[in-house]
Amino acid sequence: MKEKIVIEALTKAFYQKEKIHTAVEDITVSIRDGEFVCLVGPSGCGKTTLLRIIAGLIKESSGSYNIQREKKESPLQSMVFQEQGVIPWLTVRENVAFGLKMRGLDKRIVKERTDRFLEKVGLTAYARQYPKELSGGMKQRVSIARAFANDPEILLMDEPFGALDEQNKFILQEELLHIWAETKKTVLFITHSIDEALLLADRVLLMSAGPGSIVRDITVDIERPRTMEKVRADPRAAELFVEIWNHLQEEVQKGRKGNSS
Amino acid sequence: MSESKAIQLEKQEWRRQRRQERWKQLLTIASPIFLLLVWEFLSRTGLVDARFFPPPTAIIGTFLSMAASGELFSHIGISLFRIIAGFLLGVIPAISLGLLMGLYSPLRHFFSPLIMALMPIPTLALLPIILIVFGVGETSKVVTIAGSVFFPVIINTVAGVVNIDRIYLDVARNYGASSKDFFLKIALPGSLPVMMEGVQMGQAIALLTIVAAEMMGANAGIGYLIWTSYKAFLLKEMFVGLMLISLFGYLFSLLLKGIQAKVVPWK
Ligand SMILES: Nc1ncnc2c1ncn2[C@@H]1O[C@H](COP(=O)(O)OP(=O)(O)OP(=O)(O)O)[C@@H](O)[C@H]1O
Ligand SMILES: [Mg+2]
């Protein structure tokens, strides 16, 4: 399959008050079309920074990245943010339609796509409500629907389920898998949770403690369609879990030493 | 059995809360009525001088006869026109410039010191200059009100935009919002709650200003009515003017609260 995202020697350093802090260092990786890739690493290792660069929200210090364009009318990427990114003064429907409206698409197309994705995340009945009336899980559904409805070349997701309780997390993970299977989008997904990575990903990229770089590239060869029960019962998943777990332990230790010295 | 008891308990609780609500509402109406009653009593019994503090019933009588003669409505009409025109002339530029300053930090840095320096000067102190520049006609009153409404609104609008959570700006940028979208879809609605507080303040200041401005350089309006009645020692007429201003203040805040609930349904 062809390459969809190509990242080459990407580095980002923040310079503040005479001090330089390298957040991500020399990241080189390519992601194929339609692949679901999870980015896993200790807190503060630069995952969000990497995603924000690809999202065009901050500028890289050096290196480059390229997102392959297929349809010239599609936006390159849409992001689901780590914090609550649902805009409180727009209704659920207006939030989902946000990207489409910003692009000035035809009203009929906006309505048709918005309806379709509201339905997919089960929020049709809440379309006219404001976000304050929604639970945390419903808000994240809005974020996800907004990103998919925008029909971007790639999707960027920054720990979208991080703040949810277990029950809601499982439900949303499976919903996400459904939508992904239907739309065949390329997804770059940040998570802290190894379980989540194993459930969702084709590949897991492991990052080192800051400055973050990619130290392992693990293929998750677990058969799809996956459910949480199946993954939990799979012996191959258990092996991968231990492998990733050990790596994270190591990195966290290294990070601690790095901070104390 | 136990369930019906629980329901009964809840019903009692609900009734208790209802009673409390009604009691609070009663208290809210009670205080002005109580004040008027005391006033009436003191004035009627001669404990305070009825020439300076005519009893409320007499003031209402005066109000009715003034209303019947039509004299009152021309004063009310002219003051209302000045308040509304001045209010709009102050609020619209304040909101537009405030949004721009909130969104674009160079503009904010450029205009902030000017606003900080001009804000403490009471517009009324500038009235002589305003009269020289704009003449004694309507324009000078409208400008005076506009000037005093402008500052609280612009300061609150800027604060409203600056305090919008950065994440929403990132969302807008990531989803390809144009400058116009930032302005209309993010900055304007996002700053509305704080902005409306400024508008409320501006409304109160507009009323203070109109009365003073009409006392100094006008030949009609509620302020003029208060001032000339006072000078002619027609204190009942003067009190009619004062009560009208207080009534206006009350009605305007109700109106603005209504508007706020309409334009900020998401809070
Ligand atoms: N705008 C900024 N200015 C200065 N330093 C920053 C900035 N943004 C991030 N950093 C630093 O870069 C490092 C990486 O931050 P980043 O948010 O990418 O981590 P993360 O891997 O997403 O962490 P988490 O898993 O906790 O979300 C941190 O040490 C952070 O302090
Ligand atoms: Mg992060």
Image (cartoon, rainbow, N blue to C red):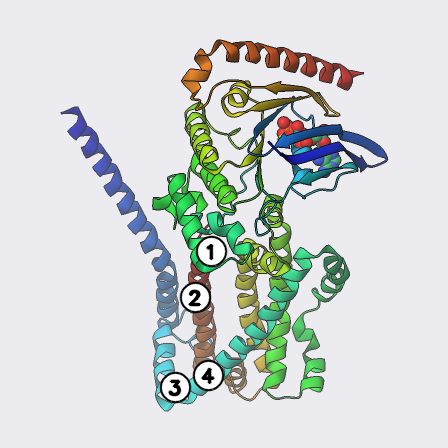
Label 2 crowd (10 A; few <14 / some 14-19 / many >=20): few
Looking at the rendered image, the disc whose residue lies closer to the viewer, 1 or 4, is: 1
Pointers 1 and 3 in contact (C-beta within 8 Å) = no
Indicate the quadrant where residue B237 lies.
bottom left
Are discs 1 and 3 both within one chain?
A: yes
Q: Name the chain letter of the residue that bears numbered label 2.
A: B
Q: Nearer the viewer, mark 2 or mark 1?
A: 1
Three-letter code, disc 3: Met
Q: Is residue B262 left or right of residue A125?
A: right
Q: State the residue position of label 1.
A: B264
Name the element at disc 4: helix
Confirm or reject: label 3 Cβ below 8 Å from ligand 1: no
Circle 4: residue type: Gly
SS state under label 1: loop
Q: Nearer the viewer, mark 3 or mark 4?
A: 4
Q: Secondary structure at mark 2?
A: helix
Could you say where residue B9 lies in the image, as x and y percent from the top left? Answer: 22, 33
Foreground mark, 1 or 3, reads 1
Residue at the farthest front position: A1
Badge 2 and badge 1 both on one subunit:
yes
Spatial CA distance of label 2 from label 4 is 18 Å
**Compared to A4, does B249 lie above or below?**
below
- Please tell me which residue lies in front, A141 or B210: A141
State the residue position of label 4: B77
Identity of the amino acid at label 2? Answer: Leu
Can residue A117 be seen here? The reply is yes
Q: Chain of mark 4?
A: B
For label 4, count other residues whose C-alpha is less than 10 Å away and answer few (under 14), some (14-19) or many (20+): some
Same chain, labels 2 and 4: yes
| Residue B66: numbered disc | 3
Q: Is residue B234 visible?
A: no
